[in-house]
């Protein structure tokens, strides 16, 4: 009888389900851990936007695309940037900060106001030609609004680049390369505007393929800017009354 009960129990016992093989596809679909902590979110978004601009030579991408590139949720950018324009303004500010850094670095070991202005000019044009889409964004009307004008974060960064030029002009006045009258704020501003206009125009002409080859456009800085520097040394002019130049921080 015992044997019969045991045999019956053995026959009626539920069979164990076979073990399933691990789902490799599901494992792959599991999101990877975030590569940075929350405090690094804004720099990660800026880096993603800069990479997209460099790759596409445009800034028509969406905030969702930036978030995807940064590896965060599509809502994450709004923690730091209320709209896309705010992100682009921060990107443009990075561009101006990099420009100012290149201009300052170009002055290492260079003596004399003329040589130093030419070095700054070559650094300026080289930065624009090497980063065409970013350079366009830095001056794009897409960042301007009728009520607020240019974004404050961008203007503060642009002021760093202008400060480099202003400082070299001031050095030239102290050294006697330029007349003492350029120490006057209106004449100093006019000199900075003249230099900026020449460099910006040359950079844009190279970017738009109106002058080239782009790899050698820096060699044009001396003849273009040199003539302007000679003119400033002989007869500097002042800005007309009521005229301002950016950045007005």
Image (cartoon, rainbow, N blue to C red):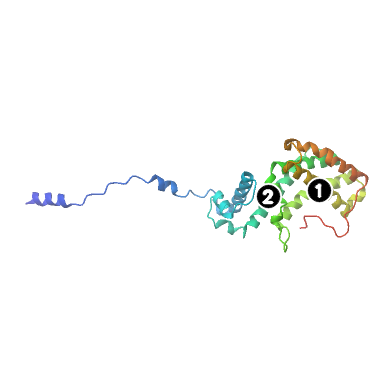
Picture quadrant of residue 239: bottom right
Residue under numbered circle 2: 94
Pointer 1: residues within 10 angstroms few (<14), some, or many (20+)? few
Give the SS element for disc 1.
helix
Residue 151 in picture, x, y percent from top left: 71, 58
Q: Which mark is residue 187?
A: none
- Say left or right for 27 vs 12: right
The furthest residue to the bottom: 147
Front in this rendered view, residue 113 or 26 = 26
Looking at the image, residue 48 sits to the left or right of residue 92; the answer is left
What's the distance in space between the residues labelled 1 and 2, CA to CA? 21 Å
- Within-10-Å neighbours for mark 2: few <14, some 14–19, many 20+: many
Quarter of the image with the C terminus is: bottom right
Looking at the image, which residue sits at the far front?
210
Q: Earlier in the sequence, mark 1 or mark 2?
A: 2
Mark nearer the viewer, 1 or 2: 1
Can residue 125 be seen by looking at this rendering? yes
- SS at mark 2 in the image: helix
Residue occupied by mark 1: 197
Residue 104 visible? The answer is no
Task: List x then y, in percent, for residue 161.
Answer: 76, 49
Across and down, in percent, residue 24 comes to 39, 44
Q: How many marks?
A: 2
């Amino acid at each position: 009888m015992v044997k019969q009960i045991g045999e019956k129990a053995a026959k009626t016992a539920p069979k164990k389900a076979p073990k399933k093989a691990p789902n490799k596809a599901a494992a792959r679909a599991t999101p990877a851990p975030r590569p940075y902590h929350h405090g690094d979110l804004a720099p990660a978004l800026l880096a993603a936007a800069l990479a997209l601009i460099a790759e596409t030579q445009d800034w028509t991408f969406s905030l969702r695309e930036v978030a995807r590139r940064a590896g965060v949720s599509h809502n994450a950018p709004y923690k730091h940037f209320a709209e896309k324009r705010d992100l682009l303004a921060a990107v443009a500010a990075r561009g101006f900060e990099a420009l100012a850094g290149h201009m300052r670095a170009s002055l290492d070991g260079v003596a004399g106001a003329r040589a130093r202005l030419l070095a700054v000019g070559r650094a300026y044009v080289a930065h624009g030609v090497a980063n065409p889409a970013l350079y366009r964004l830095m001056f794009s009307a897409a960042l301007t609004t009728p009520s607020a004008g240019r974004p404050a974060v961008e203007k503060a960064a642009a002021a760093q680049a202008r400060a480099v030029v202003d400082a070299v002009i001031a050095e030239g006045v102290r050294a006697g390369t330029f007349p003492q009258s350029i120490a006057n704020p209106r004449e100093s501003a006019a000199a900075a505007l003249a230099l900026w206009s020449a460099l910006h125009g040359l950079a844009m002409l190279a970017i738009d393929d109106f002058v080239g080859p782009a790899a050698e456009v820096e060699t044009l800085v001396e003849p273009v800017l040199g003539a302007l520097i000679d003119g400033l040394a002989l007869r500097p002019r002042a800005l007309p009354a009521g005229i301002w130049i950016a950045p007005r921080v």
